[in-house]
Image (cartoon, helix red, strand yellow):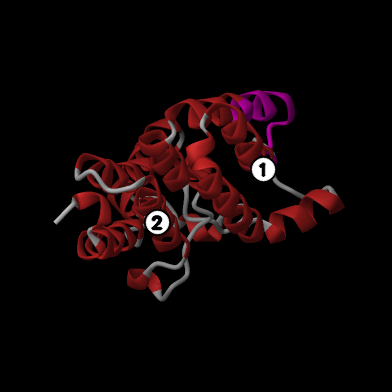
Amino acid sequence: MNPMSDPLLTILLCALAYLAGSVLFALEICKLWKLPDPRALGSGNPGATNVYRSGGWPPAILTLALDAAKGFFPVWLAHTAGLSILAQAMVALCAVTGHMVPMFYRFKGGKGVATALGSGLALAPMTTLSLAVIWLVVMWRWRISALASIIAIISGPLISAVIEPKALPLFGLMAILIVVRHRNNLIRLAQGRESRF
């Protein structure tokens, strides 16, 4: 069978991506470092930002790398198997969804930014690196992680349309998912109560 149109392989990799996404490395790393539960800090998000707040850079960078890896490798496998761009995008979205609604943690997960970063690097690296630069610039200027994430992700569809149009649907859907997951952050930003670094 032509791997470009193999629905069983696509379903298998989507399931694998969701399961990988469902592992919240922030919680496991905090246990390893004997740090507070990151869900009790800042916005309550089990991600690298809250790990940094309690443990500093080493565990935060490890969390970021592992959360990105669980998005990168399923999409890389889909690409290596010769699946279509649409199938790869489906795998990417399953990884991000797994992080947001993880089956291993009663479907209460994180915002999905680092996992989206990893998925994007595998599928559309130039667009994703451009968004990483935007994130860094906004973070340097305002020191608010949620603001940097929101501005970066909503820039995704526009940048993708210009330099990697094949990935435009992926960045469009990711922008919707991640902005919705940041709705409480948006409220706090509007009220001037969002935590700064």
Q: In this picture, is 13 found above or below 69?
A: below
Start-end of magenta stretch: 134-150
In the picture as drawn, the residue positioned furthest to the left comes out as 1
Sequence order check, earlier mark of 2 and 1: 2
User: How many numbered callouts?
Assistant: 2
Residue occupying image coordinates x 68% and y 32%? 143
Q: Which residue is mark 2?
A: 90
Q: Secondary structure at mark 2?
A: helix
Residue 71, image x, y percentages: 36, 47
Q: What residue sits 54% from the left and 36% below the top? A: 165
Residue in view at x 35 percent, y 57 percent: 21
Res 154 label: 1
Residue 61 visible in this rendered orientation of the protein: no
**Do tag 2 and tag 1 residues touch (Cβ < 8 Å)?**
no
Pick whichever, 5 or 60, lies toward us: 5
Judging depth in this view, the residue of 19 and 40 nearest the camera is 19
